[in-house]
Amino acid sequence: MTTEIEKELETSEAVLEKRRNFAIISHPDAGKTTLTEKLLLYGGAIHQAGAVKARRDQRKATSDWMEMEKQRGISITSTVLQFDYRDFQINLLDTPGHQDFSEDTYRTLAAADNAVMLIDAAKGLEPQTRKLFEVCKLRQLPIFTFVNKMDRPGREPLDLLDEIERELGLQTYPVNWPIGIGDRFRGVFDRATQTIHLFERRSHGSQEAQETVIELGDPKIEDYLEKDLYYQLKEDIELLSELGAELDLPAVHAGEMTPIFFGSAMTNFGVKLFLESFLDYGLPPRGRNSSLGVLDPTYPDFTGFVFKLQANMDPKHRDRVAFVRVCTGKFEKDMVVNHARTGKTIRLSRPQKLFAQDRAVIEEAYPGDVIGLNNPGVFAIGDTIYMGKKLEYEGIPCFSPELFAYLRNPNPSKFKQFQKGVSELQEEGAVQILSSIDEFKRDPILAAVGQLQFEVVQFRLLSEYGVETTLEPLAYSLARWVAGGWAALEKAGKLFNTLTVKDYWGRPVLLFKNEWNLQQVKEDHPSLQLNSIAPVG
Ligand code: G4P
């Protein structure tokens, strides 16, 4: 007879098996908004698709966007889109479209189990994609590649595969293969089923694409496909089989091999095939490193961690929402949990689903889900909450900022508010704070990935803490943490063209004006290990 505990375990395993969670990494304009919208369409959440586009339009007009965000008190930069497809529950951890908030994207990747790398067929790998890929690599996230905009003239598919292999060091496995490109893009060949999926072109693909599926050897093929495209496809198929790679799922799950899909999000070609395969091959919620070792998602007690804080999502209530990734156990509304950093207990009374601008109270959530908690001032990025045995998840690392400026408070009577604001904004992850090692230079150094982060900090210091500040930019563009800390730095001796500063935890950070200076220091001091990503604390 099955015991209650066994039954519960079976249920939780079944729940996990049917959950997938992912984030999209791409360079602006590759089609992230469009693909997101189309995925929602298949997930039956079409009424929300407009919301996605509206957000994209907000972002496109940066200055208007900023003005609007300022008026309402900043800032909708990302949400979580939850939808069902087949009997799967899918969480898309949406990331800010604007490049200046990519620090948020880095952190969101810390909460994702899979990444979808979206690339523009004409452009191939672009800078933002490469940067985000580095973060995925660090976490060994499985990466699914969608080559978009096949309806437009683009690069040779093999050339794109080669670029991914060479530059990212990922093995590639094309799950499907494009038939034609640009005006002559007719569909894709699905290698697993050896079938041809031909699509009917519709303007902007506002509905699910109509597709005809035929076997490779079907004589009817000539009615559907021009001869030259058919012969080209046969040649390509032969070539692919000569290349010989097999789809190796353990390698995919370890982030060593990427399954590749071709399509066009705008016309809705290949999106469904992609979604289906992603559900089959993607990783269900997986274990995470904690102070108790790797904690499997089937661990019975509820645990989770904060990967993002967002201020003032609701203009009517000046609030701060903590995005919590559920890691284990079942989350229930009104639960009283432990907060690892402070040792306090907290009632989670208004948990929210974070779907675009809509927010609904949720009653329960499972591993892989994200919930929004509204407990002002309690949470910082990386905080763990748990039931049962005390534990803490590995923190979310710091990523190399690219812009630096002294932040000054010209009004001494506002000193306290200034200090409080700066430290709260740092905890929230709005910006990183560095400081000079010269004790006479007390002004904090703001370190950000994008200029808008500075604007947000100054704006919020004024509107929430009543402090007017000024910025003095520093002419540096790269930061590296020194492995081995101060001792290693001292041992290395004098470094040229760098500025040494401290991070929030007192660790040495070197600032460089440009890549060339960094390379120079590396060559002059080969034993010095410099990292672009550092663990918390
Ligand atoms: P992003 O979120 O990654 O920045 O990209 P987004 O989806 O906003 O797409 C950027 C532009 O590329 C949009 O054009 C979009 O329509 C177009 N696009 C996306 N996917 C495809 C595709 O598969 N094929 C083609 N041909 N175009 C695609 P736009 O002119 O900026 O906007 P819109 O007026 O079309 O909405």
Image (tube, grey):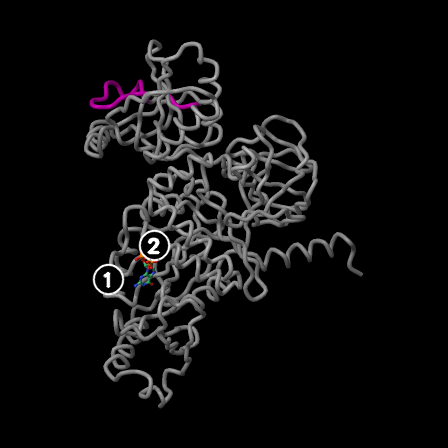
- Of the pair 502 and 458, the residue shown nearer to us: 458
The three-letter code of the residue at mark 2 reads Leu
Q: Which residues are magenta?
A: 489-504
Q: Which of labels 1 and 2 is toward the front?
A: 1
Q: Is residue 160 above or below residue 458?
A: below
Q: Is residue 241 above or below residue 413?
A: below
Quick one: SS at disc 1?
Answer: helix
- Of the pair 265 and 169, the residue shown nearer to us: 265
Quick one: SS at disc 2?
Answer: loop
The three-letter code of the residue at mark 1 reads Asp
Does residue 487 appear anywhere in the picture? no
Ranked by sequence position, the earlier of labels 1 and 2 is 1
Residue 362, given in percent of the width and then of the height, sits at 64, 48
Q: Which residue is mark 1?
A: 159
- Of the pair 153 and 518, the residue shown nearer to us: 153
Residue 38, given in percent of the width and then of the height, sits at 44, 62
Q: Is residue 397 magenta?
A: no
Q: Residue furthest bottom?
A: 219
In which quadrant of this rendering is ligand 1 seen? bottom left
Residue 101, given in percent of the width and then of the height, sits at 38, 39
Q: Is residue 491 magenta?
A: yes
Residue drawn at (43%, 65%) of the image: 274
- Of the pair 379 and 305, the residue shown nearer to us: 379
Residue 450, given in percent of the width and then of the height, sits at 33, 36
Q: Is residue 109 above or below residue 265?
A: above
Q: CA distance from mark 1 to mark 2?
A: 14 Å
Label annotation for residue 195:
none
Q: Quadrant of residue 343?
A: top right
Label annotation for residue 170:
2
Q: What is the crowding at mark 2: few (fewer than 14 residues within 10 Å), some, or many (at least 20)?
A: many
